[in-house]
Image (cartoon, grey):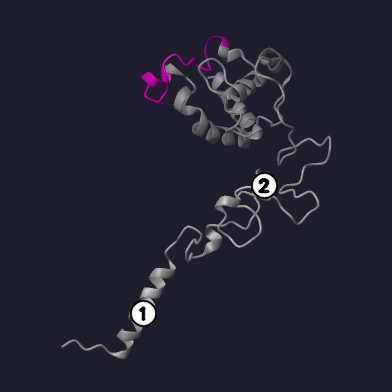
Amino acid sequence: MLKFNNYKIFSIPVLAIMLVSCDAGKDDTGTEYAPNMYHAVSYEPLIQITNKDAGEWVSSDDDIYGEYYSSNPNNPFEMNMREPAANTVPRSGSGMLPYRLPKDSLDLASRILENPFPASDEVIAEGKVLYSKYCQHCHGANGGGSADETAKVGVVFKGVPSYSAGRVSQVSGGHIFHVITHGKGRMGAHGSQVQPEDRWKIVRFVQTLQKQ
């Protein structure tokens, strides 16, 4: 004969209630653990949905707004992210302005751009580290292009020219910066991947490879 103590008898209905309460229905989301993980209370800066009824049909929280409403009701314009003052221009942490020359202005860039960083040992060393991250896999560790592949110095694609041979050895720092930014031929643009300051440091290191 089975014997149940008071603890077991009490625990059975409690467990049943817990299981039932977690069951979601048509108009009931059920019991949620940490509901703030499912219903964010923060404001997304790049989303601006001002319609307060947007997503009302899927809303599962207790506020009066639809699920997709994402504007900040705590300021007069319901803005999630404030716009910069008129006519302002963004700068990098070092005060550098955005690079505005378009891709088809390589000749102009070659003639007018000047490197804001000196050709110091420190800058060149930093450029070498950046080169190893972003450039070496195609251009080789010594900047020899396809020649480095034969020497087993780096993993490169065939047809990549050497920095120290022919016309490439004579291009200016502005030319190199522009090509890193916008790409050229089979080389893709790296402007969205490498900050302007880092591009100029890579230029300084590449210029040492041109002299080899």
Report crowding for label 1: few under 14, some 14 to 19, many 20 or more residues within 10 A (C-alpha): few
Which picture quadrant has residue 92? top right
Number of marks: 2
Specify whether 211 is left or right of 157: right
Of circles 1 and 2, the one toward us is 1
Report crowding for label 2: few under 14, some 14 to 19, many 20 or more residues within 10 A (C-alpha): few
Q: Does the magenta portion include 159?
A: yes
Q: Is 139 located above or below residue 170 in the figure?
A: below
Q: Estimate the x, y position of residue 153 in percent, counting from the top left.
A: 40, 26
Specify whether 188 is left or right of 88: left
Q: Estimate the x, y position of residue 193 in percent, counting from the top left.
A: 57, 33
Mark 1: secondary structure:
helix
Q: Name the kind of residue labelled 1 in the image.
A: Pro
Q: Which residues are magenta?
A: 147-167
Mark 2: secondary structure:
loop
Q: Is residue 211 visible?
A: no
Cα–Cα span, label 1 and label 2: 47 Å
Magenta stretch: dominant secondary structure? loop
Q: Name the kind of residue labelled 2 in the image.
A: Pro
Q: Nearer the viewer, residue 124 or 99?
A: 99
Q: Does the magenta portion include 176?
A: no
Q: Nearer the viewer, residue 141 or 87?
A: 87
For residue 13, the mark is 1
Residue at (44%, 13%) from the top-left corner?
Answer: 159
Q: Estimate the x, y position of residue 59 in percent, counting from the top left.
A: 57, 54
For residue 45, the mark is 2
